[in-house]
Each structure stands twice: as C-alpha cells, then as structure tokens.
Image (spheres, helix red, strand yellow):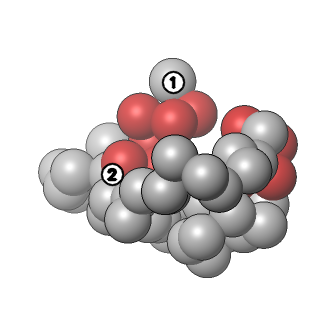
Amino acid sequence: MTVHGFPGYQQTDSFPTILKVLNGQGNTPAILVATIPGSIWRYSGGGYTVM
C-alpha cells in the first residue's frame, strides 16, 4: 500500500479522522493498494493504518 510513513502533527493541530487520512485529507496522499498483494514486501505506514 502507499504512504510509507507519516510526518505527524503538532499538539495544537486538529487531527483528521481515519477515513480522512485514508482519503488523503490529512497531511499525506491517499492510501491506496499500489501492487498485487503478496507480490513484494515493503514497509507501509498506510498498510498499518488500514490494519
């Protein structure tokens, strides 16, 4: 899945919902399936967000 990691937020920021993060309305692009599942291994912060 896309989005390797997340830059984080300041304590004074308003935090987006998980759905907004998945749809790219946080501080990263949308989290999408970018390869055929099981075809390669790579770390995905977006994948952990989905889990």
> How far from the left and from the top, in percent, is residue 46?
47, 50
Q: Which residue is mark 1?
A: 51
Q: Is residue 25 above or below residue 43?
A: below
Q: Is residue 12 above or below residue 2?
A: above
Are the residues tagged 2 and 1 within 8 Å (C-beta)? no
Element type at mark 2? loop
Q: Amino acid at mark 1?
A: Met
* Distance from Cα at disc 2 to Cα at disc 1: 11 Å
Q: Which residue is mark 2?
A: 44
Q: Could you tell whether 4 is left or right of 22 in the image?
A: left
Q: Is residue 39 above or below residue 38?
A: below
What residue is drawn where x is 21% and y is 51%? Answer: 43
Whichever of labels 2 and 1 marks the residue nearer the N terminus, that label is 2
> How far from the left and from the top, in percent, is residue 24?
72, 68
Element type at mark 1? loop
Query: Which residue occupies the extreme front position in the image?
Result: 12
> How far from the left and from the top, in percent, is residue 45?
37, 48
Q: Amino acid at mark 2?
A: Ser
What residue is drawn where x is 41% and y is 34%? Answer: 48
Query: Which residue occupies the extreme top position in the image?
Result: 51
Residue 22 seen by the camera: no
What residue is drawn where x is 73% and y is 50%? Answer: 14
What residue is drawn where x is 61% and y is 52%? Answer: 12
